[in-house]
Image (cartoon, rainbow, N blue to C red):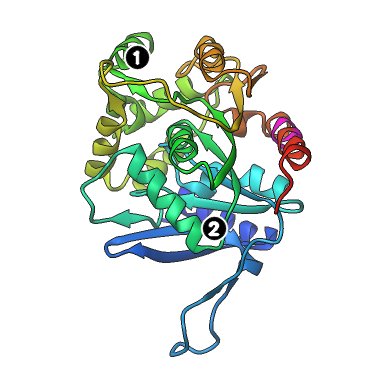
Amino acid sequence: MVNLVEALLLLLNGVMKMEGVKPHTFEIEPGTVLKFWVPKETIKKPKKAAAATATKHKPNKPAVVLIHGFAGDGILTWPFQVAALMKSYSVYVPDVLFFGGSITDSKDRSPAFQAECLSKGLRMLGVEKCTVVGFSYGGMVAFKMAEMFPQLVEAVVVSGAALAITDSLRTAMLHSLRVSSFSDLLMPNSVKGLKKLLRIATYKKYWFPNRIYQDFLKGMFSSSKEREELLECMVESSKDNTIRDIPQKVLLLWGENDEIFKIEQAKDLKDQLGSKTTLEGIRKAGHLVHLERPCVYNRCLKKFLASLSVDMPQK
């Protein structure tokens, strides 16, 4: 029987290629392989198998990097944003490690290692400056990239994430969500658990047949051991947590009905980050704001990106 989610992914692959991006998998260091969806004009593959490796070209438009969260890979997370941005921007959509086509034999599971790998991959693809857009776990990685690689990251857009998850924040979030661990919520192993995740992550209450949930569980929740380690390593001790210095302009683009990272947390985060940070709340949207209200989300995102072209012209 055909897995409907895998069939959807095949369809999305075809649509994304029509939009002008194509998959490119490459080794950034021994044992670490990343998969990116990249603008097709930036990668020229050799005509003969025995020829040299693919030739990479610098993007000819401002680069935007879209980093996914924990429940799906890059292309499943960002189809509406790729379609909206491709005309004016060079869009890069990576799979973070242990999602999609990205994998490593390193034992490091920290957001900092994810940020380091993505930054290295982008530079290997010819990207010198970019705006990073991160959702949920991808937002934490985006913040880490901005902190560690300010020469690469010009600006940051984040939805439904924190600078870091501390012990105290984890305890408060788990109590609010009525779950025992992040793994229980974000890595469901049953239809019931997946329905609960969708119910918490969305404003509207959607109905799908159980077959869809079963196919999603089979198709999207592999590498479970490594992903559980990622969840453990994203939590920092409250004692060790320090205020991050994020010098870039930041847009916090939030679902006002987000039950995982509430809008009040976004307001606190804006105050913490300072005057270069703006907060845009989107009504009638939950944690999956970019999928629930894609037109509003994309309009806010493009407005922010357009402002950067005035303040920080691409060199």
The numbered mark at residue 169 is 1
Mark-to-mark CA distance, 2 and 1: 33 Å
Does the magenta-highlighted stretch encompass residue 195? no
> Magenta part of the protein: which range?
298-303
Q: Give the class, few, some or many, for how many residues have Cα within 10 Å of label 2's Cα (few <14, many ≥20).
A: many
Quadrant where the C terminus is found in the figure: bottom right
Which residue is identified by label 2? 37
Residue 23 image point, x, y percent: 52, 63
Q: In this view, does 96 lie above or below 183?
A: below
Marks 2 and 1, the one that precedes in the sequence: 2
Residue 86 is left or right of residue 128, and the answer is: right
> Which percent across, then down, holds residue 181?
27, 22
> Under tag 1, what secondary structure?
helix
Amino acid carrying mark 1 in the image: Leu
Instruction: Tell whether label 1 touches label 2 (CB within 8 Å).
Output: no
Q: What element carries label 2?
A: strand
